[in-house]
Image (tube, helix red, strand yellow):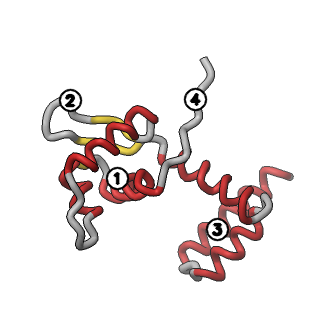
Amino acid sequence: MAKRSLPKPTAGELEILGVLWRRGPSTVHEVRDALAHGQRVAYTTVLKLLQIMGEKGLVTRVSPTRPHVYRATAEAGVKRRLVADLLDKVFDGSAMNLVMQALSARPASRDELRQLRELLDGMEGDRS
């Protein structure tokens, strides 16, 4: 059976995924509170979005009873899909241009630069 690719999340779904990626499994109330940003977001709105996201495979419901607890699924896959779309639409497929823009927009920490070097060294080693 072929693996179904995850759909690209909408802006609202991406905001909810961001909360779940940061917090881990969370109740609808916790997600709603994290989204509020000074505005009141309706519980039913957040619940409905999470239910739709569940149908799409972006989240799973952890607890079958109340309170509803959801967790994000396939974080790496969703992020990879978003980056691939950005690469194609904005950077003409060039990973180099994407990385250069990212590093000029927000400088990397020493630890991030070390990790980048390790990644690049590993990629070069794979090609030898």
The structure residue drawn at horizontal position 28% and vertical position 47%, both measured from the top left corner, is 25
User: Which amino acid does the dot numbered 2 rest on?
Assistant: Pro
The amino acid type found where label 3 is placed reads Leu
Callout 3–callout 4 Cβ contact below 8 Å: no
Above-or-below relation of 32 to 65: below
Q: Amino acid at mark 1?
A: Leu
Distance, label 4 to label 1, CA atoms, is 22 Å
Judged from this view, the residue extending furthest toward the top is 1
- Which residue is at the front of the view, 21 or 13? 13
Hey, which residue is sitting farthest left in the picture? Answer: 66
Earlier residue among tags 1 and 2: 1
- Please report whichever mark, 3 or 1, sits nearer to the chain's N-terminal start: 1
Quadrant in the picture for residue 68: top left
Q: Which mark is residue 116?
A: 3
Mark 3 or mark 1, whichever is nearer to me? 1
Residue 27 appears in the figure: no
At x 48%, y 48%, the residue is 75
Instruction: Tell me the number on the disc at residue 64.
Output: 2
Ranked by sequence position, the earlier of labels 3 and 4 is 4
> Relative to 6, is 25 above or below?
below
The residue singled out by tag 1 in the image is: 20
18, 22: nearer the viewer: 18
**Label 4 close to label 1 by CB (< 8 Å):** no
How dense is the environment of label 2, judged by Cα within 10 Å: few (below 14), some, or many (20 and up)? few
Residue type highlighted by circle 4: Arg
The CA distance from mark 2 to mark 4 is 24 Å
Q: Would residue 35 be found to the left or right of residue 78 on screen?
A: left
What residue is disc 4 on?
Answer: 4
Callout 1: SS: helix
Question: In which image quadrant can residue 59 be found?
Answer: top left
